[in-house]
Image (cartoon, helix red, strand yellow):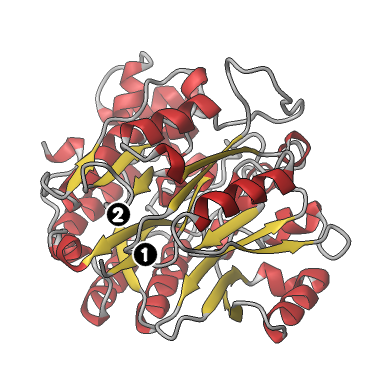
Amino acid sequence: MQAREANFDGLVGPTHNYAGLSFGNVASLANEKSAANPLAAAKQGLRKMKQLADLGFLQGVLPPQERPSLRLLRELGFSGNDARVLERAAKEAPELLAAASSASAMWTANAATVSPSADTQDGRVHFTPANLTSKLHRAIEHEATRRTLSAIFADEARFAVHEALPGTPALGDEGAANHTRFCSAYGERGVEFFVYGRSEYRRGPEPVRYPARQTFEASRAVAQRHGLHEEATVYAQQRPDVIDAGVFHNDVIAVGNRQTLFCHERAFVEQSAVYDRLRERLAKTGAELNVIEVPDARVSVADAVSSYLFNSQLLTRADGTEVLVVPQECRENPRVSAYLDDLISGAGPIADVLVFDLRESMKNGGGPACLRLRVVLTEAERAATAPGVWIDDALFTRLDAWIGKHYRDRLAPADLADPTLLVESRTALDELTQILGLGSLYDFQR
């Protein structure tokens, strides 16, 4: 069946800031407490969406979540009117105010895991919002994520939007950042590749410096919930030493698309055996796996983390060639830049590299791949989605003006206590739901 891959990027929220909340994410920790520019961040992400749409790729947008989260702060014991809640949190527990104000839902690779209808037993597209239990500021996202996905993919005959897995460390789930799908064509049955950092119940190696956020048990539960065929799933463990080097998700060390896996030579435990399993399963679908393995001697793990070479989007153009979408940091690192030049001059499937300025997102530890959720859709499934979320000239113009109207160009940690910021954010989001035609998504609208 004919199908295309759509990328749904997260629109950066009005409270984009650098609070250093993500232990294990080197960039997030390095930029803690510096001033952010929400206006620039949102426009950088929106420009990426528009340029990819202009190149013929299906491009959707996911709205920000309501921040600061007064619900979280009240659940944690802060009472009074909104301004009083913010004042008390800023004075008594600024770290909790920072968690309640994070715009981290912009990184929609962590929003959910998605299985297309070609892979599932009931023939529907399945979504499981990630519970993100490893970080408080992210663990509060999944309910709003489910609400948003349910509004966009509302046709229950074609889509199944599940609840997140139970929020326990044994089922720590970080979404599509640890999930890749391989296939001969998007509409054909594929092989779904789940990468985990540790297992709760199976003994095995674990990192010692930074936490492993994805568990084997969570990956297996998502596959079972989605009704995936057992022969079309492969599980692999991320190397603990690369997690300790700052590779907090698999998409910081590997990216895949259709029949291509682009990864570092130190990505997986027992890496050659992982390749063998993928090749065996993929061969049953009539496809061959093409591995592009980057040697450590050319690009070190430290270079990969600082440049986000693998946190790139690997996209298939209409002519069948592949293009790699990278942040500008890849061109600023001489070793990574030289490797990319050699990559596209060779005979491999990656024919071109597109470079984007995503500096504001990168400073918080999120590159091109972090900003998007991949959803494979048939034409009928695409027609059944909410029509107002697809990027075109008209929506880009409206969103660009909306950002300019509502976003600040400077936000420091101390500004999170400003009750005016809450009012500004709610005003912006209320207008946004009308632009996107998604109804009343937010608590304050209900």
What residue sits 46% from the left and 63% below the top?
A: 286
Visible residue check, residue 124: yes
- Where residue 153 appears, as percent x and y from the top left, is 18, 51
| Quadrant of the image containing the N terminus | bottom left
- Which one is in front, 42 or 426? 42
Residue 317 in which image quadrant:
bottom left
- Where residue 299 appears, as percent x and y from the top left, is 81, 62
What residue sits 44% from the left and 45% below the top?
A: 232
- Which one is in front, 64 or 79? 64
- Where residue 227 appears, as percent x and y from the top left, is 31, 36
- Residue 400: give its label: none
- Which one is in front, 360 or 300? 300
Q: 221 above or below 101?
A: above
Q: Earlier in the sequence, mark 1 or mark 2?
A: 2
- Residue 118: give its label: 2
1 and 2 marks in contact (CB < 8 Å): yes
In the rendered structure, the answer to whether residue 165 lies left or right of residue 238 reads left
Residue 230 in which image quadrant:
top left
In the rendered structure, the answer to whether residue 106 lies left or right of residue 60 reads right
Q: 128 above or below 438?
A: above
- Residue 186: give its label: 1
- Where residue 329 appears, as percent x and y from the top left, is 68, 68
Q: Name the amino acid, label 2.
A: Ala
User: Distance of mark 1 from mark 2, alpha carbons?
Assistant: 8 Å
Q: Name the amino acid, label 1.
A: Tyr
- Which one is in front, 293 or 421? 293
Q: In terms of secondary structure, where does tag 1 sit?
A: loop
